[in-house]
Image (cartoon, rainbow, N blue to C red):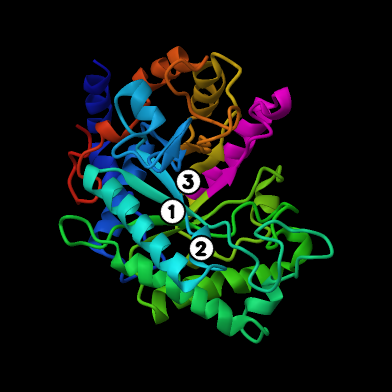
Amino acid sequence: MKRFFQYILLLLPLFSFSQNRITLTDKKATPETKALANNLLRLSEKYILFGHQHATEYGHGWRDEANRSDVKSVTGSHPAVIGVDFMGLSDRTDEEIIKEKERLRKVIADTYNRGGITTVSWHFPNPASAGSFYWKDSVSAPAVKLIIPGGSHHTKYKSILQTIAGLARSVKGNDGQSVPMIFRPYHEFDGWWFWWGKPYCTIDEFKILWRFTVSYLRDSLYVHNFIYAFSPDNLFATEKEFLERYPGDQWVDMVGMDDYNDFGRYGKYNVDSGILRLKIVSDYAKRAGKLAAFTETGLESIPNTTWWTEVLLKALRKEKLRLSYVLVWRNDATSPTHYYAPFPGQASEKDFIRFYNDPYTLFENDLKQVYKRKYDILK
């Protein structure tokens, strides 16, 4: 019954939606990448896709099991959007990077072949110092000014982007086509915890970094299967603040935000503020002709047994937001408490099934041909 209502809802805006299309920053984007962007836009008018970070790579108490995810164990379907990370493509030995590329290539291709969607975060180890991707006082270098053109580490940065481009170009589906990915670099840049954060680079330096990254990947390294996503944390209250470090419409395809604090972190809820921020993101996307997404959220350990329907779902539906997807963070394989999606027996499992069954939410099994220019994109 849920799928019947989804199909009817999809038909309603059929003709008006055909005039509403995304123009990607990459004019040479592959047909599959263009189709994905436009299908995400179309679906966002009536639905939201559910995503989970590292969903098929590992989960609560397991790792590297074929075609498994905690979400599938609960609902029978993988998430519609699955997050991976390019963290392992630098600051490692050549042998380790080769192995990581092979592993990522399989995870991303498998998702595409099933009909799902990949989004890529980048917890980029500091290329100019120790300190991992986190900022550590007295250890970390303010690397942004060092890796942009003219900086001492610019050549090294170009080499790292070449590694990313090599992977991106090499990931092919069973149909032989390059797999589209939503690439989300330098997320939560308005915070203080990453070396690319607001305290460690100027507005102009950040914009230069973003523009160079996109242009080098697109124009010099011929990566034409990326959708570029811009996502600060929730440290803004107005559109002006949201756009403070925005590099310009010609450099961004999707706008989003990460927000854990408003949705129950540390037992504190400020959901109305979270909705306000999501509305700023959604409204800007509508006006600028961009996709929008709730790029990260979640409640660690999910102690609130009705969090999915009473907090998250209500927030997503309250202001008629146009969001392509909502992604919750990972389920650690070894930690007993670090998880953001339910698994069999977890306290919020029943409520998550209600969330899954709501006509508004889409999972991988709901999708059909999202990489094709066809109207029939739901099963």
14 or 250, nearer to the observer = 250
346 or 151, nearer to the observer = 346
Q: Position of residue 343 (x, y in %)?
A: 44, 23
Q: Which disc, if any, is residue 289?
A: 1
Q: Which disc, if any, is residue 239?
A: none
- Res 359 seen here: no
Q: Position of residue 312 (x, y in %)?
A: 53, 25
User: Is the Cβ of the residue at disc 3 closer than 8 Å to that at disc 2?
Assistant: no
**Mark 1 → mark 3, Cα distance in angstroms:** 10 Å
Quadrant of image for the N terminus: top left
User: Is the Cβ of the residue at disc 2 closer than 8 Å to that at disc 1?
Assistant: yes
Count of all numbered marks drawn on residues in the image: 3
* Label 1 packing within 10 angstroms: few (<14), some (14-19), many (20+): some
Give the residue type that dot 1 points to: Gly
Q: What stretch is highlighted in magenta?
A: 256-285
Q: Mark 2 points at which residue?
A: 249
Q: Is residue 321 left or right of residue 113?
A: right
Q: Which residue is pictured at 29% across the width and 67% down the height?
A: 170
Q: Where is residue 299 in the image (x, y as percent from the top left)?
A: 60, 28
Give the residue type that dot 3 points to: Ala
Quadrant of image for the C terminus: top left
* Magenta-colored stretch includes residue 273: yes
